[in-house]
Image (tube, rainbow, N blue to C red):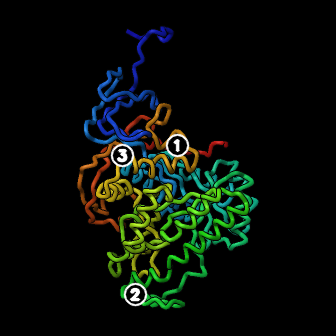
Amino acid sequence: MMTDPYDIAAPVIYDLVLRSRRTVLPDGERPAAVAIAGERIAVIGDYDEPIPAHRTEDLRDLALLPGLVDTHVHVNEPGRTEWEGFATATRAAAAGGVTTIVDMPLNSLPPTVDTAALAAKRDAARDQTWVDTGFWGGAIPGNDTELKGLHDAGVFGFKCFTAPSGVDEFPPLDTAGLHRACATVAALDALLLVHAEDPAHLHAADTAGRIHGSQASPSSAFGSFLATRPPEAETSAVREVIAGARATGARVHLLHLAAAEALADIDAARREGVRITVETCPHYLHLAAERILDGATAFKCCPPIRGEANREALWDGLADGRIDIVVSDHSPSPPGMKTGDFATSWGGIASLQLGLPVMWTEARRRGLALADLARWMCTGPADLVGLDRKGRIATGADADLVVFDPDREWTVRAEDLLHRHPVTPYDRETLTGGVVSTWLRGKRIDTDAAPRGRQLRRSPR
């Protein structure tokens, strides 16, 4: 018998109820039942509460987390789709519990530095994303007048470099250019993302790993590479970003912080009222320079992975709130670009599918909780870009969810990962915690079925 839609006394029957004894909610982890109507979370009840639904799944001791939001992903399509692409990147994201990505304006061709390039990016992504996808714009020398058009077209903010980016078509801003970009984004009340390394503190190395312009003489090839990008390169650039934000009132966000020394300046700037946020990445929190073997160029990234003591200091920064979020900086390339030596190989790490288990492996042994990961990897990144219906299990939010087995131990096999090329520094590493399923707007993602991801635009402030 059909329910009369005009009968206000008729019981509500939800589409789906997911029950878990480990539901990660904004106020912490507890047993709960999450009722979904259409694409949204409609009700959050007690674990044993009777809630009428067309379908109910009891996850028991499997954890239920919000879908991860990864605001630092290099998809590289169009133009360098042989490096990665929307189909492969977003399938990997879904397999890793990521339900929303924001794509960086490089290394695609053309880079997303004007509205025509943004249109090309959106055309390339159409009908081939398994997760919801937004886009950053780029700030490069000479495109100041393009930023308002990109902002009006819905990009989530603008990325710039203070040192060479690795691709010629996306050059860095000098100090004057950085300050102009800060002034422009301040006028728009937009967000400026900065890859902060000071070229004055970067040193050249030849293919044998010898350092030019530095007195460092580390004993390994990776140590030689590490000496070419010392912590001073980051701390000096961070101070210049702070100066630009202080002078203009701009909102700035520091990308992939590797040098924990910079946290003191960031903390002081915040106390002054400078609007600054900061991210780091799983590889800086899990890997350490002392354990990287000669020739292991899958570990190369810029800024580089630093030492054990630095890693612990980054964890301290996360624990006390000086670091806001953790995102992947997924920056893959064809395998041939990751061969050779640390001086010449591509500086990027492919890890989009692995961030959650990598972080849980570290967090669990440190006595941290799944709720901490949700704050750093779900809610925090969503809040950074103004996606208030993403990254949280809350009434009215999109039903983007991850079923996660926190006790599973498994070994990474690069060839089983879904990003385009089987290169990752985590190959053959044993991790704790595995994604069981990922749900996008109320439906389980099937990476073998048609993609359902949508393109996202920045909401007007």
Sequence order check, earlier mark of 1 and 2: 2
- The answer to the question of whether label 3 and label 2 lie on touching residues, with beta carbons closer than 8 A, is no
The residue at the point 45 percent across, 52 percent down is 376
Q: Quadrant of residue 248?
A: bottom right
**CA gap, disc 1 and disc 3:** 17 Å
- Under mark 2, the amino acid is Pro
Instruction: Tell me: residue 333, above or below residue 296.
Output: above
Q: Which residue is mark 1?
A: 454
Towards the viewer: 100 or 197: 197
Residue 225: where, in percent of width, then height?
Answer: 44, 82
Residue 304's mark? Answer: none
Quadrant that contains the N terminus:
top left
Q: Which residue is mark 3?
A: 448
Taking depth in this image into account, of 267 and 424 the one nearest to the observer is 267
Return the x and y of residue 94 as percentages of the image width and height: 40, 48
| Mark toward the start of the polypeptide (1 vs 3) | 3
Which element type, helix, strand or loop, lies under badge 2? Answer: loop
Q: Residue at x 35, y 80 (%)?
A: 295
| Residue 337 at x, y percent in the picture | 44, 74
Question: What amino acid type should be assigned to the residue bearing mark 3?
Answer: Asp
Quadrant where the image shows the C terminus? top right
Query: Please, is residue 177 above or below residue 124 in the view?
Result: below
* Drawn side of residue 413 relative to residue 42, left or right: left
Tag 1: amino acid? Arg
The mark closer to the camera, 1 or 2, is 2
Q: Nearer the viewer, residue 251 or 151?
A: 251
The image shows residue 357 at horizontal and vertical percentages of 33, 55
Residue located beneath label 2 in the image: 218
Q: Residue at x 28, y 41 (%)?
A: 62
Q: Is residue 104 in view from this perspective?
A: yes
| Above or below, 382 relative to 185 | above
